[in-house]
Image (tube, grey):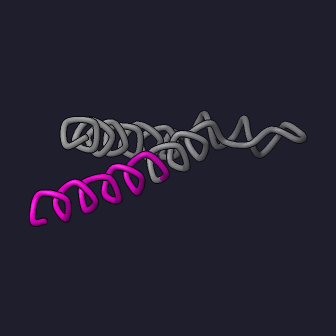
C-alpha cells in the first residue's frame, strides 16, 4: 500500500503540473472563451491530479499508522 500511495502522489503531482501548463496556454484559454459549453482541459487535469494526490496522502497516512501498530 505504501508503493501505491507514492505512485498516486507522484501521478497526482504530474497531473497538476500538466493541467497548470495547459491552463496557462493562451490558445487554450481563447478556445474556451469563444466556444460554448466547453471547459478548459487543464482544469480537468488539475481536478484529477488533486483527487489522486489526496487519495495518495490518505493511503500513505493509513500505511504509516499500520506500521506503528
Q: Is residue 18 left or right of residue 59?
A: right
Is 61 or 38 nearer to us in this picture? 61
Q: Which residues are magenta?
A: 51-69
Is 32 or 11 nearer to us in this picture? 11
Q: Residue furthest left?
A: 68
Residue at x 28%, y 59% (from the top left corner): 62
Is 69 or 59 nearer to us in this picture? 69
Task: Give the x, y percent position of residue 4.
Answer: 28, 36
Q: Is residue 32 left or right of residue 26?
A: right
Task: Give the x, y percent position of residue 55.
Answer: 41, 52
Picture quarter containing residue 66?
bottom left
- Give yes or no for residue 15 being in the magenta stretch: no
Question: Magenta residues: mostly which secondary structure?
Answer: helix
Q: Is residue 65 above or below residue 45?
A: below
Task: Give the x, y percent position of residue 40.
Answer: 66, 42
Residue at x 55%, y 41% (from the top left corner): 42
Amino acid at each position: 500500500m505504501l508503493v501505491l500511495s507514492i505512485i498516486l502522489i507522484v501521478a497526482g503531482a504530474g497531473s497538476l503540473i500538466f493541467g497548470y501548463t495547459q491552463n496557462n496556454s493562451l490558445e487554450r484559454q481563447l478556445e474556451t472563451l469563444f466556444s460554448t459549453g466547453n471547459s478548459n482541459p487543464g482544469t480537468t487535469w488539475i481536478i484529477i491530479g488533486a483527487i489522486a494526490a489526496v487519495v495518495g496522502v490518505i493511503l500513505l497516512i493509513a500505511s504509516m499508522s499500520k506500521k506503528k501498530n
